[in-house]
Amino acid sequence: MIGCCVPSRDTSDRFSDRCFNVFPCLSDPVRRSTLCLRLALVMLHLVFVGFIFIFNEEFREESKDQPWYTLIYLLLVFVTLVQYFFTSGSSPGYVLDAMREFARTEASLRALEISKQPASSKNGSVVVTIDRNQSGEHLVGNNPMNWTKLVMDMYPPGTSVRTYTCSYCNVVQPPRAKHCHDCDRCVLQFDHHCVWLGTCIGQGNHCRFWWYILEETALCIWTGILYIKYLQASFSKAWLVAVIMIILLSILLIALIFLLLLLLFHSYLVLTNQTTYELVRRRRIPYMRTIPERVYPFSKGACRNLYNFCFARASMYAMEPLPSALELEQKSVPYSCFDVISCRCCC
Ligand SMILES: [Zn+2]
Ligand SMILES: [Zn+2]
């Protein structure tokens, strides 16, 4: 028996080794589970959409008469899947990446300053510029003092560096950043870690995430309508298919309710410039504890927040300083009738 088992284990090990050689990404268990999740999502979409094409004869007939209707539906399926992969593969904006970007910018600025200095001969200046550029990058990259100063200037004077130093990454976190234990990195403007997408949602991909929820909601509604149409027309003809369709429709409705709530919740967060973490764990964030509940410290008005969220993200690593005491005081003034008429919440 033992003799029979050993070669089979060896064979499976050899097979998995070959697989890992061909696809190196599969050797990492985290990547493997993400890949499985993505495959499951694609399969789920194929099952729900495929059922309509296989069993709904009327839909197939309609497709011949009105091909544009089917084409738009299929386009929505394709765009939703592309948006899923696009969001899932995007970076949420890690603090370490922001630090590197800052170091690079500072090094190039230093190099530019040095190259502008009227110094020695032409050949010599080139050598000096390259040398200084490399040493500048090396200096800033290894000495995080400049980063610490930049970040601490965003907090009120007298704030301790230790309060905002991540004990896992050993970096100073700018306001709104948080360490994600799943990604094992600090994320800028951390919203939440999405298990469904297998990545964090933060400053770099929150907008993409919102669009993904919108597209998935639209797809759910359209697919649900097609299912209901089929059940209305052919419930008595093929009861077994109808029962499967009812089960799928029930799952679709539960998913739709969840997606609609999620879409509304994230739209509210966008309009008030908040994150899920800031809303849910407000008391855990030291600088948020003293701010009244109904005051959104980073909000610049609904219109400006929406514009910044969609278009004006100048850099993926742009950071927002904490508002001053005066600004917070202005924000906490209760709304009067004039404020409502003049749309104070919008601008
Ligand atoms: Zn961290
Ligand atoms: Zn994460």
Image (tube, rainbow, N blue to C red):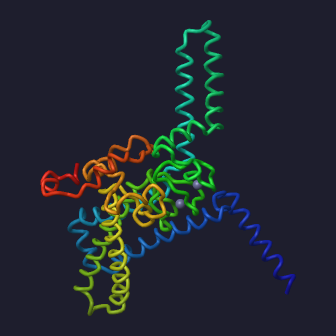
Q: Quadrant of the N terminus?
A: bottom right
Q: Position of residue 312 (x, y in %)?
A: 34, 43
Q: Nearer the viewer, residue 292 or 171?
A: 292
Question: Residue 53's x, y, as percent?
Answer: 34, 75
**Residue 135 visible in the shown view:** yes
In the rendered structure, the answer to whether residue 63 lies left or right of residue 97 reads left
Nearest the viewer among 198 and 142 is 142
Quadrant assignment, res 215: bottom left
Where ligand 1 lies, by quadrant? bottom right
Q: Farthest right residue?
A: 3
Residue 19: percent from left, percent from top: 68, 63
Q: Is residue 165 above or below residue 144?
A: below
Q: Give the residue at the far front of this rendering.
A: 158
Judge left or right: residue 155 versus residue 124.
Answer: left
Closest to the observer, 109 or 26: 109
Total marks in image: 0
Residue at the (53%, 21%) spot, across then down: 112
- Asked where in the image residue 5 lies, by quadrant, the reply is bottom right
Q: Is residue 157 above or below residue 42?
A: above
- 10 sits left or right of 64 in the view: right
Q: Residue at x 44, y 62 (%)?
A: 277
- Residue 103, percent across and down? 57, 35
The residue positioned 39% from the left and 64% from the top of the image is 279
Observer able to see residue 76: no
Say if 202 sits above or below 314 in the image: below
Q: Residue sitting at 48 percent across and 63 percent down?
A: 284
